[in-house]
Amino acid sequence: MRDRLDKIRAQVLEAIDSTSDEKALEDIRVRVLGRKGELTLILKTIGRLPLEERPEIGRLANRLKEEIEESIRARKEVLRRLYRRSQIEGLDLTLPGRCRPLGSLHPITQVMDEVCYIFERMGFTVVHGPEIELDFYNFEALNIPPDHPARDMQDTFYIDDKVLLRTHTSPIQARVMETQRPPLRIIAPGKVYRCDSSDTSHTPMFHQLEGLMVDRDVSFAGLKGVLTSFVQQVFDPDTHVRFRPSFFPFTEPSAEVDIQCVMCKGKGCRICSHTGWLEVLGAGMVHPEVFRHVGYDTERFTGFAFGLGIERIAMLKFGIDDIRLFYDNDLRFLQQF
Amino acid sequence: MRILTSWLKEFVAFKVPVKALAEDLTMLGLEVEEIESVHKGLDSVIIGHVEETIPHPRASHLKICRVSLGREEVQVVCGAPNVKEGQLVALARPGTVLPGDKVIRPTKIYGVRSEGMLCSGEELGIGHDSTGILVLEPGPGINVGRPLIEAMGIDDWVLDIGVTANRPDCLSVLGVAREVSAMYDIPLYRGQGSEVRTQGSEIPISIENPELCRRYAAAVMEGVKVGPSPDWLITRLEASGIRSINNVVDATNYVLMEYGQPLHAFDLDRLIGPEVMVRTARSGETITTLDGRERELQSDMLVIADRERPIAIAGVMGGSETEVDVDTGQILLESAWFTPVQIRRTSRALKLSTEASYRFERGIDPNGVMRALYRVIGLIAQIAGGHLVGTTDIYPRPYRDREVSLRPQRANRLIGIDIGSEKMADLLKRIGIKVLYAGDKEIRAIVPSYRPDLKEEVDLIEEIARLYGFSNIPTLAPRARIVTQAPDPSQGLIKKIKNVLMAHGMTEVISYSFVSPRDIDSLGFSRDDPRMQIVKIQNPLSDDQSVMRTNLISSLMGAVARNQAHRNQDLALFELGAVFYNSTSGELPKEEQRLALLYTGSRHSDLWSGPKGQIDIFDLKGVLEGLFQAIRVSEWKVVSNTPHDPFYLPGSSARIVWRDGSVLGTFGEVAQDVLDAWDINGPIFVSDLSMDSIERASCRQITFCPLPRYPAVERDTAIVVSDQVSVQDLMDYISTKAPEVLEGVKVFDVYRGRPVPEGSKSIGLRFRYRAPDRTLSDQAVSKAHRRLIRSVLQYYKAELRE
Ligand SMILES: [Zn+2]
């Protein structure tokens, strides 16, 4: 009888360990521990054994029963875990997540924000002015009288004889200086308009940022400092910058600021017309005539002003070769930024 | 301004290569935009030595030549009769582009390989002999293997210089030469010539308006033979961008380019009188200008007239009736100084800009008038024969020297350098400024007559900065006081709005501020709508961009049209920008910042999970709710939009009203008429918001609320009400009846259909109760809730939904 129990034990425990689902386990339980199960029958027949064998066989059989029950329970637990794992195995984590697709900000907005941020860190404050502007602020207050050839530099959209679409953000300079005294550190971002037909580098509307710093001892050397720092922040810390003399009626001395071509690193390419340089800013010391217009004492105060085209910077940063793309509002373009 | 380096060299002997010259001029303020070789394409024309010639086996007039280029030998087939062994010749290698765009390629001539071409002087554009190939005399530099142009020392370049509006003096070879001379501190050869007054000619000349014509000089020449110009002159004019007409006209243009003084030649025999009068035009006068167009003259235009009629528009263009042509024998040459503003007005009024008017309106050298006249007389005598009869110089308002003073200390401070007054004076002298006195406190100087831009101290400071070199000026942190100015709050708000909308999946667009009047019309505004107060542009580029937009909706419609054309159907767009209205008050039209949102297409169509289906109005309203929450606009509600904006589908739009009654904006579905007008597919949902109102409603002050200490209790109740009752109504009513412990109510479900009777809807509401000072008991909540619900049911004659 003892041999029989040992044999059952070996067979059943092995069978339990090799089950792969709960049903097979249940089958084993029924076969061994069920009403007519092998072990149940043995337990039922213990009474028929010789008296001296009964206690020991009974003990062994009951221990085996417990052992099998425990094994089934343990195996059931194992099977449950395996089952969960197999469910996870069907999971494809390469499927996209359940996310609301992001929109995008216009590249001009992004570059404008970045440019403003750089100047704001240098202590400049953002101010705004009207897009439809008086001839006075757009030209005369900036030392561009009527019939001055400098008006040719900017083809102007007129509303009437005295009112026009601002051709630059510079009129904000005059507007701010009319109401505020130095020290001044302002930047004025916004849309500007020129009566230019569209091509790959012109659109009749574009964005500029104007800057102005006025105090008692502002010099051209300081202008170089601020703009060099700006250019190296917006492009690359190693960007070579050069200032060369130019002409704007409202600044003197006036400068044009070039950076070494970002495409060819100064070797000369189509983008930089083989000069190795790209013009990115216009700047200069505020012309005394502009100060006189707003009643600043030209002996006490000096200042510098600068202006830059946002589209130009965006095109260089992103490698865009056609400015018109900014205003086509084509999603295939806008969503790249 | 196109300047030939060979021409420049006649004035100033600079030694640097052309690239360095261009770079240096650019850094001096004369931006060289392009450098162009006059012998473009001839880089691979190399000096060769003819080693051997053998007759071509199949063509008796051709020779097969073995040509040494020093390191290598090539074989070319040549048909020139003069080719001989031992000659130094010009070999155009493959890749050469000869004048006339003839490209040299390796080829086979009657079966014999030919790797290039031996050229004649004419073929190369450097000589006129076409009878045979160019044979070079041995000499210094003429070495086998060298590029021909370089070896002959005839390399010549056109510098295309962008001359700024303040520097009319640089619109000439002389002017650029002056800058080169100043830059390298080397002498200028010509241009200082003294004026020689000669006998007056017989022709009476008078100036009626000396305020418009400061100086008028004329010369009479006779025996002139009008014909083609010599090649060297044509070459220079063409390189400068001027077409050759005949020798007399070309001579005037040549001197114009050289000295910057516009000149004009009249056929003297065709002048009535002959007499010359500088006067304003009389009413009704017309003139046919050299370009063949008849032009009506205004009484404020200055003309040159003979006894009876205008013969030229002063400073702009001559008349065709007195034009110099092959029959001309006697000429009258004009060299004058006209008032810049006068010429500019005339040129603009006639929409006629010429080399002459361009210079006059910027200001030419009043003291250069005679110099140029003598130069052109000499040139005409040289190339067209003839001799001078006499000259006249009427100069009613002589130029007076202008004295400008400068404080060295001021210059140093403004520039940010520290140089002495001696050094400054030296720099100024280099550009022709006569320094009268140079002390530590002051430099007094007389500026040259050709520099109308030098008027005050700062003009001299600029010259010092420029000549000192911008790159020599230090780069420093600015010396200025810190400015404490809080940023404009709208700036932060705008940034936040844009970011929130982007996070909601919306893409920002920027459209032109000008639109077509049809775009505004498409929205169907009534005539008295402020959005029909359209600001028109006087000089638009096209009708499509001829008025300023009065709303952003049409801009977004345009964006939809363009995107649908590219099959972008699912769109979530916004634009934030100015719109413009005519206004009777104020000097300027009214400008208003607005924000517009647009949704169309399907919801997340490209996602494998998540809500699907067509976008509807609640997708848009959800974005608005999220936006208002983010920018802290609370206590707004939606009211019916009556009368509704005409671009909305009737009955499907609403107004958003803030607690003070101000309208933040509207939202709704776009009307079919609008979709049809733009030829776009709907449904499209838009919202149009006023940035001013939003900014006012946006709360910038955040006040902390202590956290609740006691738990809340919720009760869900569904009420069946008539379809006519809006949720807003219901909420408003509940708020009037709310017990103190009601913290909030939310709609969690809306249901129509069985078993809810037709014409009614079931609204599921979740009520949240809480007391700040105690835990509410179940009974207390139930009691308060029951009372509230009973009142709602009574008021709306509604029922509970079981
Ligand atoms: Zn480049």
Image: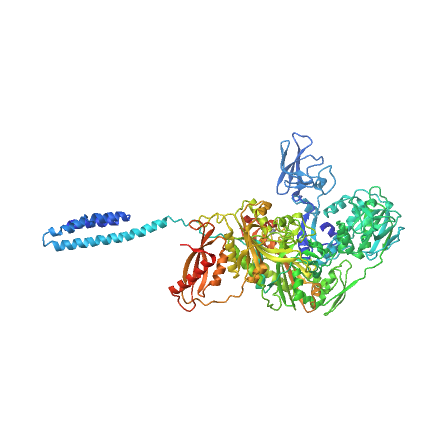
For this orientation, the residue located farthest to the left is A51
Where residue A216 appears, x then y in whole percent?
65, 69
For this orientation, the residue located farthest to the top is B58
The picture quadrant where one finds residue B400 is bottom right
Q: Is residue B372 visible?
A: yes
Q: Nearer the viewer, residue A255 or B157?
A: A255
Where residue B193 appears, x then y in whole percent?
80, 56
The picture quadrant where one finds residue B192 is bottom right
User: Vertically, is B445 above or below B168?
Assistant: below
Q: Nearer the viewer, residue B534 or A332?
A: B534
Q: Nearer the viewer, residue B76 or B335?
A: B335
Q: Is residue A198 left or right of residue B629?
A: right
Where residue A332 appears, x then y in whole percent?
54, 48
Q: Is residue B382 left or right of residue B3?
A: right
Where residue B316 appears, x then y in whole percent?
78, 50
Q: Is residue B502 left or right of residue B169?
A: left
Which colour assignment does the render follow? rainbow
Q: How many marks?
A: 0
Q: Nearer the viewer, residue B165 or B224?
A: B165
Instruction: Give the residue at x 61% y 56%.
Output: B578
User: Vertically, is A301 above or below B349?
Assistant: below
Which quadrant is home to the C terminus of chain B? Answer: bottom left
Q: Is residue B16 visible?
A: no
